């Protein structure tokens, strides 16, 4: 670890002085900023905390993953966004994928038999879709375990406020 840290610090220090006409922006991301060496943190002018998505952002993520992909909802987008509070963007994307999988499984119960019947049967098959429902959401949400817990959210907020003071 010490050799890797030394190598990284050397590379970061060398970026600014290689060519005065070149502009280099270095961006780094971590899920555990408190475990970073102070020497690394000091090489970056700004540290920015990117919080979990707010209501509007969750709406946009769900819309992007479902509605803009041609799926329709038999439930309220607002309600889905409200019920995904505390989930990260990645977790919401995973949730929407699970919703689609659940709907497709429900609508195409013979799909496995078709797949086992051979390539000709698969080529001739059609996949049915239906509007996504509250039931699809309920089934999917039980399979999502949020990575962030209130204590961790508070820890990030505390770190973010220290960086901006």
Image (spheres, rainbow, N blue to C red):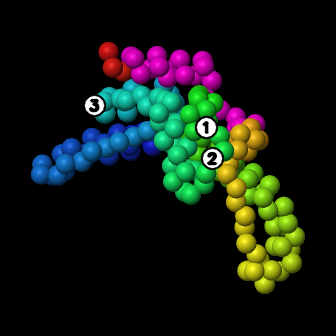
The crowd level at tag 2 (other Cα within 10 Å; few <14, some 14-19, many 20+) is: some
The crowd level at tag 3 (other Cα within 10 Å; few <14, some 14-19, many 20+) is: few
Answer whether residue 21 is magenta in the image. no
**Most common secondary structure along the magenta stretch:** helix
Q: Are marks 1 and 2 in contact (CB under 8 Å)?
A: yes
What is the secondary structure assignment of the residue under circle 1? loop
Quadrant (top left, top right, bottom left, bottom right) of the C terminus: top left
Return the residue nearer the eye: 13 or 119: 119
Query: Disc 3 or disc 2, which is closer to the eye?
Result: 2
Between disc 3 and disc 2, whose residue precedes? 3
What is the secondary structure assignment of the residue under circle 3? loop
Residue 73, labelled with which disc? 2
Residue extent of the magenta highlight:
140-162
Q: Residue visible at 56% across and 34% down?
A: 78
Q: Residue visible at 56% across and 57% down?
A: 70
- Check disc 3 and report the residue beneath it: 45
Give the Cα separation between the discs numbered 3 and 2: 44 Å
Give the Cα separation between the discs numbered 1 and 3: 42 Å
What is the secondary structure assignment of the residue under circle 2? loop
Residue 153 figure quarter: top right
Return the residue nearer the eye: 32 or 48: 48
């Amino acid at each position: 670890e010490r050799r890797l840290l030394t190598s990284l610090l050397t590379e970061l220090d060398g970026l600014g002085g290689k060519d005065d006409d070149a502009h280099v922006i270095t961006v780094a991301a971590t899920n555990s900023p408190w475990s970073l060496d102070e020497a690394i943190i000091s090489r970056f002018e700004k540290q920015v905390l990117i919080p979990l998505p707010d209501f509007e952002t969750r709406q946009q993520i769900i819309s992007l993953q479902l509605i803009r992909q041609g799926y329709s909802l038999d439930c309220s987008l607002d309600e889905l966004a409200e019920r995904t509070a505390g989930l990260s963007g990645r977790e919401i994307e995973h949730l929407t994928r699970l919703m689609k999988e659940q709907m497709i499984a429900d609508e195409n119960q013979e799909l496995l038999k078709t797949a086992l019947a051979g390539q000709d049967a698969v080529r001739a098959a059609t996949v049915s879709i239906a509007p996504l429902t509250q039931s699809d959401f309920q089934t999917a949400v039980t399979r999502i375990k949020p990575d962030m817990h209130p204590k961790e959210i508070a820890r990030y907020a505390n770190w973010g406020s220290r960086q901006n003071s």
